[in-house]
Amino acid sequence: MSGQGPVPPLALAPAMSDALARWLDSERGTRGRSEHTITAYQGDLLAFLSFLGGYHGTPALPGALAALTQSDLRAFAAAERARGLSARSLARRLSAIRSFLRWISDREGFDASRALSARSPRYRRSLPRPIPVEQARAVLDLAGERHPTPWIAARDMAVLTLLYGLGLRIGEALALNGRDWPMEDSLVIRGKGGRERMVPVLPAARQAVAAYLRICPFPLTPDGPLFFTVKGKRLYAGAIEGAMASLRQSLGLPETATPHALRHSFATHLLAAGGDLRTIQQLLGHASLSTTQVYTGVDDAHLLAVHRAAHPRR
């Protein structure tokens, strides 16, 4: 998701600030949005409402949103593109704005259809960039040796093994607590939108976590973290991203070889081995099968690349 918008040229009116806060609470509470998503939505709406303030010369008020038209949203979209926002980020930003407009129009009793009919920019969804099987294995092997402190090396290897072996998001892996150990044959993961899913635990993943815990200097508690920083706090994503950057450099991997790429690799390699999309959807915790179907494009792209490189009549 993109970052927050520009600094508002005009302060939000108290009524609008209150409406925005209530909408964000609604998204957080009733729709289970993560704090990362809430922060992004807040940035989206602050950018839009501050634009309206400058565009019309007066702070936006809840009731005044009834007068919004397609032209207003088009002007905002043009300003954002001129600022350098990508088509994909703009489409997501406009989606958040429409959601807010639907919410506030219900509460203020006005028809927002004139603004809601504005089209979002089209963009071509980029394909995930997984790491080949051999390179994924090399990442895990080197992770266990990279850091001079043995327990930190074992910790990094354990986390990365969960991403590749179970298809977890990095936030899901780092949210695991002491109560999640010992891991049985399956593990309940709470993902985006508060959705729970059950994922099988491979022996290699269980062994990697066990090897880390044997030498970890901090004791586990039921509500405490499974993975620790050097100060005994919950491990954060930046530490694993830094470890992966070091591994990337050592192995000569591209910038796209991120921790999240290991999750992509899990799905792509499973699909190549004959896994069906519906099962992969459940393992990844995708709400929609269309999200999972993007991995079929990765497989097709790989086949085309091999064909173009190897066909005798190329």
Image (tube, grey):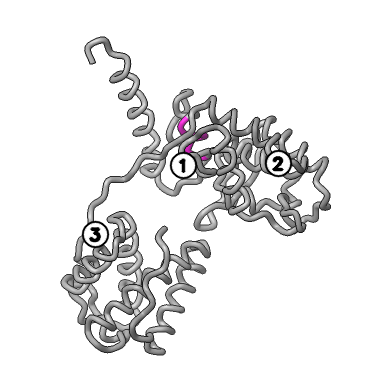
Q: CA distance from mark 3 to mark 2?
A: 46 Å
Q: Amino acid at mark 1?
A: Glu
- Residue 48 seen from this side: yes
Q: Quadrant of residue 58?
A: bottom left
Magenta segment range? 263-268
Q: Residue at x 43, y 34 (%)?
A: 277
Sequence-wise, the earlier of marks 1 and 3 is 3
Which residue was labeled with disc 1? Answer: 255
Q: Position of residue 61 (x, y in %)?
A: 31, 86
Q: Position of residue 95 (x, y in %)?
A: 32, 63
Which residue was labeled with disc 2? Answer: 147
Q: Residue at x 44, y 49 (%)?
A: 287
Q: Amino acid at mark 2?
A: His
Q: Which residue occupies the extreme top position in the image?
A: 312
| Numbered circles on residues, count | 3
Callout 2: 10 Å neighbours few (<14), some, many (20+)?
Answer: some
The circle on residue 52 is: none
- In front: mark 1 or mark 3? 1
Q: Residue at x 67, y 35 (%)?
A: 205
Residue 198 appears left or right of 280: right
Question: Are the residues at dot 3 and dot 2 in contact (C-beta closer than 8 Å)?
Answer: no
Sequence-wise, the earlier of marks 1 and 2 is 2
- Is 52 in the magenta? no
Q: Amino acid at mark 3?
A: Ser
Q: Is residue 215 above or below residue 306?
A: below
Q: Residue at x 37, y 73 (%)?
A: 6
Q: Nearer the viewer, residue 251 or 233?
A: 251
Tell me the element at label 2.
loop
Question: Are the residues at dot 1 and dot 2 in contact (C-beta closer than 8 Å)?
Answer: no
- Residue 279 seen from this side: no
Callout 3: 10 Å neighbours few (<14), some, many (20+)?
Answer: some
